[in-house]
Image: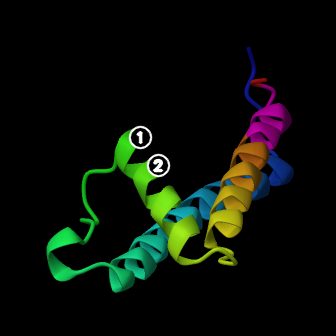
Amino acid sequence: MDIKVTAEGVVSGALGIACLFYSGFVWYQQIGEVNRKLPEDQQISYLWMYAEKGSDINRRYRRFYPNGRLNLLKYGLQVAGIALCILALIFSGLY
């Protein structure tokens, strides 16, 4: 199996990783928005992410901000990042 390094593969891979990286920042912004609405003793920690904690943050965010766009932005960036990374694999001949 030969790996081809093309400009398209490098650019799409870099953009994919940047999208996934930025979605993490949006995730932390979402935690901050939820924590603003919670009392001090019930605030959510920024560390140690796991599935149950993630669904709790999403549920609370939708409840506190019914018209909030951070969920849509986060999921859009994740989908775009994964699609661009798959495209980079296709350009490199690995997929």
Q: Which residue was labeled with disc 1?
A: 51
Q: Which residues are magenta?
A: 86-93
- What amino acid is labelled 2 in the image? Ser
Q: Is residue 77 magenta?
A: no
- What residue type is disc 1 on? Ala
Above or below, 82 against 17 in this view is above
Residue depicted at 66% across the width and 53% down the height: 78
From this viewpoint, which residue is outermost toward the left?
41
Looking at the image, which residue is at 40% across and 71% down? 31
**What residue did someone put label 2 on?**
55
Q: Between residues 1 and 78, which one lies in front from this camera angle?
A: 78
Residue displayed at 37% across by 83% down: 37
Q: Determine the image quadrant of residue 18.
A: bottom right
4 up-or-down from 26: above or below: above
Q: Quadrant of residue 32?
A: bottom left
Report the Cα–Cα distance between label 2 and label 1.
Answer: 6 Å
Q: Is residue 92 magenta?
A: yes
> Is the residue under label 1 in contact with that under label 2 (CB below 8 Å)?
yes
